[in-house]
Image (cartoon, coloured by chain):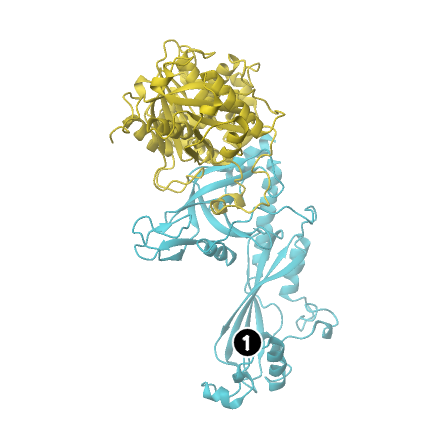
Chain colours: A cyan, B yellow
């Protein structure tokens, strides 16, 4: 058991090194828009979206609002480039072979993930940065690069790697007009888990605490702060015991902290959790403490004072909560000894 | 802090009663409550029609109106409920005693009836909507009181070097007393250190035998003025002092977030208790200390001043908590760990027996007994004397 864990850790490290070698490589060849930015496609888009902003369809309104002419809705960015799946007989990725016919970097990366069992995919988020408005007559080209591959993460869907692709959009003059980062999760499907899996208890979300769980969903660990005297407090509450103020805001925690105390829950067991279950009270470097599950560590290796880092984990479709992982990998020096015992 | 006005020794516990303790009792909680109140009145030699104050826990399922309708009380002129589960017990008796001491009522009854042995474990459903504080623990899998107290215990062990042997000392002392008490659920079950160490983990660092029992049972006591008590069947057991305590920045059962999680409500309660008392901890001959979990006894020994901070572990050594040679025998009927778990009310009745001289582990010449309610929650304590 213990030696199996060590082997798994080594395999994961080797895979990560293999995956990270793709970072910075073009995903595939550049793609050119088949049509220039045109009013007809914009009309279809704004009709479908129900967006009645006149700057997308009316020259006069666009100029009155400081634009050189009719502009395309910014979020249409990718629509100028995308091709329908069926228009590429060999599938989207097969189409992206370079001149020599070799598989694209993206295809090779996905082959490696598939081979390691991360066969399922879900798009997780997309960020767009706009340099200038896109106007009628622009002709866009996109080049895409594999921006980053995350270490293996534990998510509500299953264990997997986040893959971020960076797409640079340029115009007919070769000038950059926008950048998009598109992130997917390639994960190992959880065949063993029953469909009607028991969910973890739902927090009662009130006005006083909603920010914390919204922050977690957005990947940030937030701490409530008194807007008057600046005292940080957790758990959140409506008023400051130090100065009496009811005004508050939040600060984003670094996520770094140490284990203040911990338990390992064994028995009896309820369906929503995996056991043995290590849970810690973590003291954040900002000074407040909070409860969070410990991940990426054998319960026997947990110690008070151990440095940990927060990770926001979606435990199901509705709930994302902070968990904590050792800041320094634990147990690496013990592999030989543990194997010897086994 | 000066003592509470007109309270010291003004009232006495004149009657006590309890049902059998079992994993399963047939009657309903309401029937058990009525039975045990009538029996406590009989023990005192007082007719239930004289009862005019009723006090219990907010978690008690049977309401005052139902007690009154069933056992034929007269007009009730004082009734109160005390919150926070296991922290309530001594507060219930203390508030009943205050009602009698101030003349709000003449005959007060405090009781608790609970079928926690055969009823559901409250934490097992993960689909019920949580109260707000649960947001910071339950979604992470801290579902039960034992997980919450285990978290404090781990920190306590880390800070002071306390060990599982110290926890075993507590569990074994209390079990020894249960073995002497025929009413205790664990009466026939001795426990060795090996038994303790071999029991399964529940929530590390706490194992099965650090946890209290799950019991069906009910208990009650009758409080009257000291003057009246002197004319009744049993020698009076005076309510010498009483206190409740809820410190600043406290969070019930999950006191992990403030500056000093290991000085819980017992400390605040103790300050008021000793201020109200003519005695100090050094004058206490025997103690009944709330023990839903064995480490609560360590925390309480420190909070009530029986030893310095961090010294409760060593204080458990050499049979110090055991009848009959120990310097402070605790939970002489077996406590929540080994007699019965009825939210700590059995500790109150055992305190009364020690002062009457009728305990099955009677401490020779005991004149004073401390009874405490739950540490880790807003709590309460009683100092009884004979």
Residue B95: in sight, yes or no?
yes
**Quadrant placement of the C terminus of chain A:** top right
For the residue pair A63 and A276, the one nearer the viewer reads as: A63
Residue B263: in sight, yes or no?
no
Which residue is located at x 63 percent, y 57 percent? A186
**Quadrant placement of the N terminus of chain A:** top right
- Residue A76: x, y in percent? 58, 76
| Residue at the far right in the pictured view | A89
| Residue at the far top in the pictured view | B364
Q: Quadrant of residue B367?
A: top left
| Residue at the far bottom in the pictured view | A60
Q: Chain of mark 1?
A: A
Q: How many marks?
A: 1
A244 vs B63, left or right, is left
Secondary structure at badge 1 equals strand
Which residue is located at x 53 percent, y 84 percent? A54
- Residue B229: x, y in percent? 38, 17
- Residue A129: x, y in percent? 49, 72
Q: Quadrant of residue A149?
A: bottom right
Around disc 1, counting alpha carbons within 10 Å, would you say few (fewer than 14), some (14 to 19), or many (20 or more)? many
For the residue pair B208 and B180, the one nearer the viewer reads as: B180
- Residue B176: x, y in percent? 49, 14
B4 vs B356, left or right, is left
For the residue pair A18 and A223, the one nearer the viewer reads as: A223
For the residue pair A232 and A147, the one nearer the viewer reads as: A232
- The residue identified by callout 1 is A169
Which residue is located at x 29 percent, y 21 percent? B280
B258 vs A203, left or right, is left
């Amino acid at each position: 058991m213990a030696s199996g864990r060590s082997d798994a850790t080594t395999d994961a490290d080797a895979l990560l090194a293999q995956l990270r070698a793709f970072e910075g490589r073009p995903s595939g060849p550049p793609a050119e828009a088949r049509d220039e930015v045109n009013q007809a496609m914009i009309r279809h888009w704004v009709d479908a979206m129900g967006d009645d902003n006149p700057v997308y369809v009316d020259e006069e309104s666009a100029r009155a609002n400081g634009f050189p002419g009719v502009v395309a809705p910014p979020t249409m960015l990718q629509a100028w480039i995308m091709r329908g799946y069926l228009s590429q007989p060999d599938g989207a990725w097969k189409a992206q072979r370079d001149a020599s016919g070799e598989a694209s970097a993206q295809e090779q990366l996905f082959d490696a993930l598939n081979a390691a069992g991360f066969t399922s995919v879900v798009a997780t988020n997309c960020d767009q940065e706009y340099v200038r408005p896109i106007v009628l007559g622009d002709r866009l080209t996109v080049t895409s690069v594999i921006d980053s591959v995350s270490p293996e993460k534990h998510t509500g869907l299953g264990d997997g790697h986040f893959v971020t692709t960076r797409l640079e959009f340029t115009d007919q003059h070769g000038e950059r007009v926008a950048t998009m980062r598109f992130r997917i999760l390639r994960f190992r499907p959880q065949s063993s888990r029953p469909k009607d899996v028991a969910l973890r208890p739902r927090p009662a979300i009130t006005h006083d605490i909603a920010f914390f769980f919204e922050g977690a969903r957005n990947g940030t660990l937030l701490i409530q702060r008194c807007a008057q005297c600046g005292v940080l407090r957790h758990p959140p509450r409506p008023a400051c015991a130090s100065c009496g103020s009811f005004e508050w805001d939040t600060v984003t925690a670094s996520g770094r902290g140490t284990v203040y105390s911990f338990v390992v829950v064994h028995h009896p067991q309820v369906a929503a959790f995996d056991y043995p279950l290590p849970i810690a009270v973590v003291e954040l470097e900002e000074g407040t403490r909070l409860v969070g599950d410990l991940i990426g560590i054998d319960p026997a290796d947990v110690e008070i004072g151990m440095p940990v880092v927060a990770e926001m984990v979606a435990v199901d479709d509705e709930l994302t909560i902070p968990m904590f992982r050792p800041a320094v990998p634990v147990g690496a020096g013990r592999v030989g000894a543990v194997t010897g015992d086994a | 802090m000066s003592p509470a006005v007109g309270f010291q020794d003004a009232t006495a516990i004149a009657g006590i009663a309890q049902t059998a303790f079992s994993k399963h009792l047939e009657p309903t909680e309401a029937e058990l409550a009525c039975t045990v109140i009538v029996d406590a009145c009989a023990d005192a030699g007082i007719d239930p029609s004289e009862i005019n104050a009723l006090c219990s826990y907010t978690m008690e399922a049977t309401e005052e109106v139902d007690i009154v309708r069933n056992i034929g009380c007269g007009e009730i002129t004082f009734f109160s409920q005390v919150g926070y589960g296991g922290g309530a017990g001594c507060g219930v008796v203390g508030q009943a005693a205050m009602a009698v001491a101030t003349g709000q009522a003449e005959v007060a009854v405090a009781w608790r009836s609970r079928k926690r042995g055969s009823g559901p474990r409250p934490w097992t459903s993960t689909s019920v909507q949580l109260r707000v504080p649960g947001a910071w623990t339950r979604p992470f899998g801290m579902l039960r009181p034992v997980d919450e107290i285990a978290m404090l215990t781990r920190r306590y062990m880390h800070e002071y070097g306390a060990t599982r042997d110290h926890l075993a000392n507590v569990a074994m002392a209390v079990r020894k007393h249960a073995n002497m008490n025929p009413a205790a659920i664990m009466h026939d079950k001795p426990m060795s250190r090996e038994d303790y160490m071999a029991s399964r983990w529940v929530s590390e660092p706490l194992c099965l035998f650090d946890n209290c029992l799950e019991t069906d049972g009910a208990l009650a006591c009758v409080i009257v003025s000291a003057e009246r008590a002197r004319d009744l069947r049993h020698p009076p057991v005076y309510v010498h002092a009483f206190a409740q305590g809820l410190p600043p920045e406290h969070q019930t059962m999950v006191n992990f977030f403030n500056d000093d999680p290991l000085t819980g409500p017992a400390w605040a309660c103790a300050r008021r208790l000793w201020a109200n008392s003519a005695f100090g901890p050094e004058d206490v001959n025997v103690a009944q200390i709330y023990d839903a979990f064995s480490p609560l006894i360590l925390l309480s020994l420190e909070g009530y001043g029986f030893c310095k901070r961090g010294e409760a572990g060593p204080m458990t050594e050499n049979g110090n908590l055991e009848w009959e040679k120990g310097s402070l025998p605790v939970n002489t009927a077996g406590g929540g760990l080994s007699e019965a778990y009825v939210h700590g009310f059995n500790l109150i009745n055992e305190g009364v027996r020690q002062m009457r001289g009728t305990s099955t582990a009677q401490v020779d010449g005991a004149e004073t007994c401390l009874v405490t309610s739950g540490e880790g929650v807003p709590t309460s304590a009683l100092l009884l004397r004979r």
